[in-house]
Amino acid sequence: MRNDTPSPDLGMLTGRLMRAIQEELFSTLAEQGHPDVRPRHGSVLAHLDPRGTRATDLAERSGQHKQIVGTIVDELVALGYVRREPDPADRRAKLVVFTDRGRDEVAKARAILAAIEQRHERALGADAYTTFKEMFQQVTDRQSAWRTHGGHR
């Protein structure tokens, strides 16, 4: 019997993977004391240097507009994950800096993500998982560069 159902395309697969990882990550974070952090907060928390980062740099790193990053930083300040403080290199500028609560959330998120990866590595085997990640990185890099190479590469 033929299966006429087309296999999911790359967009569908990556979207499903991202949603499934986020669901596990944020459910587990909630269980571990961080019920108020949301996927959108990752555009700041994942790109914040331990000593602090300017909002303009967070926007560039995350690919978000500066206004969106500013709104997310405001949310994270209100939730107690980050604070703003003067940049010692330029007193006119502000750095977004982790609070203890923010550092705890990032440490827990990294541990949860590492456990997810270890689970998949065990299921697929170390060599297959390493190959998968290398190839997935190549596809991601090539897709990210599509605009700079005339729409194709």
Image (spheres, rainbow, N blue to C red):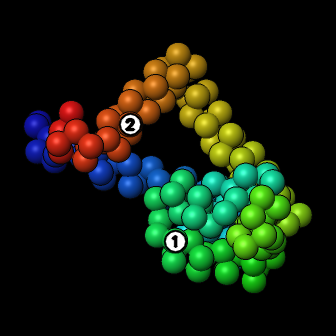
Please name the residue that numbered disc 2 is placed on. 141
Report helix, strand or loop for mark 2: helix
User: x, y percentage for residue 18?
Assistant: 47, 53
Determine whether, in the image, residue 143 is placed left or right of residue 111. Answer: left
Number of marks in picture: 2
* First in sequence: mark 2 vs mark 1: 1
The mark found on residue 90 in the picture is none
Q: Quadrant of residue 54?
A: bottom right
Q: Is residue 97 above or below residue 127?
A: below
Determine whether, in the image, residue 10 is placed left or right of residue 132. Answer: left
Q: Which residue corresponds to the image point at 65% horizontal and 33% vertical from the top-left?
A: 118
Residue 32 is at least partly visible in this image: no
Q: Which residue corresponds to the image point at 61% horizontal and 27% vertical from the top-left?
A: 122
* Front-most of residues 103 and 57: 57
Report helix, strand or loop for mark 1: helix
* Front-most of residues 61 and 15: 61
Q: Quadrant of residue 148?
A: top left
Q: Residue furthest top?
A: 127
Please name the residue that numbered disc 1 is placed on. 66
Q: Is residue 14 above or below residue 81?
A: above
Q: Is residue 23 above or below residue 148?
A: below
* Real-space Cα separation, disc 2 to disc 1, in angstroms: 23 Å
Residue 37 is at least partly visible in this image: yes
